[in-house]
Image: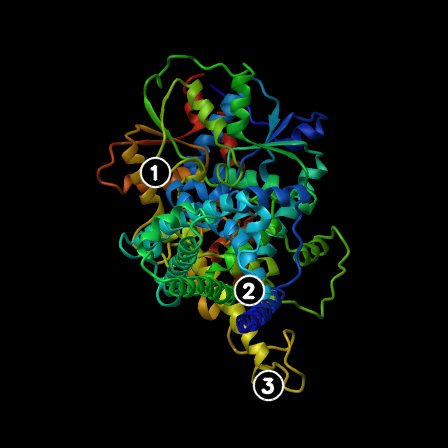
Amino acid sequence: MSIQVPIYSTLYNEGISPEILFWVGCAGSFDTRAQRVTKAFCTILNKIGVSFAVLGEEEKCTGDPARRAGNEFLFQMLALQNIQTLNQYGIKKIVTACPHCFNTLKNEYPELGGNYEVVHHTSFLNGLISDGKLKLKGGGSFLGKKITYHDSCYLGRINGIYEAPREILEALDADLVELKRCKSNGLCCGAGGAQMWKEDEPGSGRINQARATDIINSGAEIVAANCPFCITMLQDGLTSDSSEKNIMVLDLSELIVQQL
Amino acid sequence: MHEQIIFSIFCILSFGFAAKRFFAISRNINLGVDWAPNSTPLEKWKNVVFIAFGQKKMFTKWLPATLHLFIYVAFIFTQIELIEILVDGISGSHRVFLPVLGSFYLFIINFIEVLSLLALIGTFIFLARRNLLKIPRFQSVELKGWPALDALIILLAEIVLVSFIFIMNTADVALHQESYQFFLSGFLVPLVQDFDTNTLHLLERVGWWGHIIVVFGFIIYLSYSKHLHIIFAFINTYYANTQPRGKIENMPAIMDEVKSLLGIAESNSDTNQLPDFGSNDVFNLSWKNILDAYTCTECGRCTEVCPANLTGKKLSPRKIMMDIRDRADEVGKKLDSGDVAFCQDKNLPLSPANFSDGLSLFSQISTEEIHACTTCNACVEACPVLINPLEPIIKMRRYEILTLSSGPADWVPLFNSLENNQAAWSLSTERSAWIADVND
């Protein structure tokens, strides 16, 4: 199925202002694994006919890793340029599949002059499901399947969104098994704070492997996630574990797309 | 009469010395830069009532929370008895509230006795948790030495304090069988019933004086101890930030500079004056960061959930807070010394603005520690008194990157690609290349 991904500037020049801006993020744009999430989310948007667009080449990194690494100058450069672009188009509502982009756009851009309604795709998709706009095939491939959910720090503990992803899993008829450390007590995947781009400091183990152990112990066949960085870290952690039995790490949108 | 004079002297000396210590701590906290919480008065008081007074976050661990509650409630209600001791001590009266309150007085003392017993039980279990059961969060390397001794001293002092209360009450019950109906100490009376009246009077005085001396000592000891939290927990929760947790504090100076670079706004900054960015010492932390450090009880709930610490990295959020307090104490002490050796400019008098001892936070906190943080906020979530250990970590990263122009070598390619390609990775493909894929 061919899906349409309109570019904001093109629509803007035609005098059309889409309902939402889909903020793709660096991972969603460049990382081959995260691109699959981007595509899954676009497929859902196409399927139910949500009017959306992406910034395309005009989108820049939100600056999250720069700010958390301590490079405020670089953060400001990126953030202020993004805000210029967003304000120039008069953008009101942004949906993103990355909780880091979500957090920075939602919580850090306002003080710099960027005020938008920012929604993480997990909440957005859950809203569509509960409004009846997004209909899932009940009793499908996830019926009775043990699925666990990994709370990303930036969606969960930092922004307090714990229920929306779990409601989606419920709508998928999955058998949700919680990890030992979940919700506000969830264990980080190890990528945040710009750790994604550096080697670990010396230690006795890796954070993603500790989290992979939690997942293996849950007995789940699938791990649902909401963050491109978590997906990479968890998959790496699981692959490095010899006892691993092909547990799949999937974004919630990838689960939904299978049930359309 | 002698007793009253001695008591009054004790009172003045201990309160006077404690006041001096608390002024010093207040000065140390104010070495930090100005900062104002953006919370509303309602939010502030809500935090004080629920988090500090109501112990809400303690109860994520119900067992230590319950034991701690015994000690905490006992402490609060014992203040009634303490007020009476102060009045008795100065005026020479004996149990001055008894004739005034009558049977309600008996109820209060009985209530305090029950709480004291519960606190005693809690204290013994706490001692066991630290010294016999070896709960992991009490075995960390940063607790070796003084912090472990500090915890032990407090628990032992609690046992001594409660023992003196029971000695005093038991002797009083034995002396005044009719009017002093204290249920729990009544059980202890058989132990002293063979004593003559003079011995009982002496015993009562030992209990009374022992109790108040421990209290006086405690008021002074607090200022050197992690036990300062019994006061600072309330202040700290009052000033806690209630803005979104995911918002890292903005740096307006840099924002304005970048705005002028981008031509969004006129530059209004004085380019001749290049400030240090981030924090390397108490002088460029906020006063709230230092208040956080003085509030820390070293319970280790933060370190226990820190993913970096859990995987054996050197980072421990608790150690960061302890190091900040130690540094604030050290700077304070050196400022008080008046020693010109600590003057940055030897021609000017020693002051916070003219201070240099060649040391900084980086003398205690290694870059390895601050580089290990994933900013996951588990430490922030875990703290029962709303301390934010993440904030100083970010500020130290800022100092390292912006002021020292150093940092982890691995981050150089990240910064380069963010600067040159406005993306976290430098790839030959365009940002929107994936769209061509899906449109097929």
Asked if marks 2 and 1 fall on the same chain, the answer is no
User: Residue shown at 26%/55% (left/top)?
Assistant: B132
Mark 2, chain letter? B
Check whether the beta carbons of the residues at disc 1 and disc 3 lie within 8 A of each other: no
Decide: is A254 above or below B101: above
First in residue order: circle 2 vs circle 3: 2
B399 or B244: nearer the viewer: B244
Q: Which residue, given by chain and number where applicable, does mark 2 sit on?
A: B89
Residue B22 place in picture, x, y as percent: 58, 66
- Tell me if B275 is positioned left or right of B378 in this view: right
Q: Callout 2, which amino acid? A: Gly
Residue B96 place in picture, x, y as percent: 57, 55
Estimate the spatial distance between the alpha carbons at disc 1 and disc 3, rounded to whole Å: 59 Å
Residue B317 place in picture, x, y as percent: 44, 55
Decide: is B51 above or below A198: above
B59 or A96: nearer the viewer: B59
- Single out the mark in the foreground, 1 or 3: 3
Q: Which residue, given by chain and number where applicable, does mark 3 sit on?
A: B340
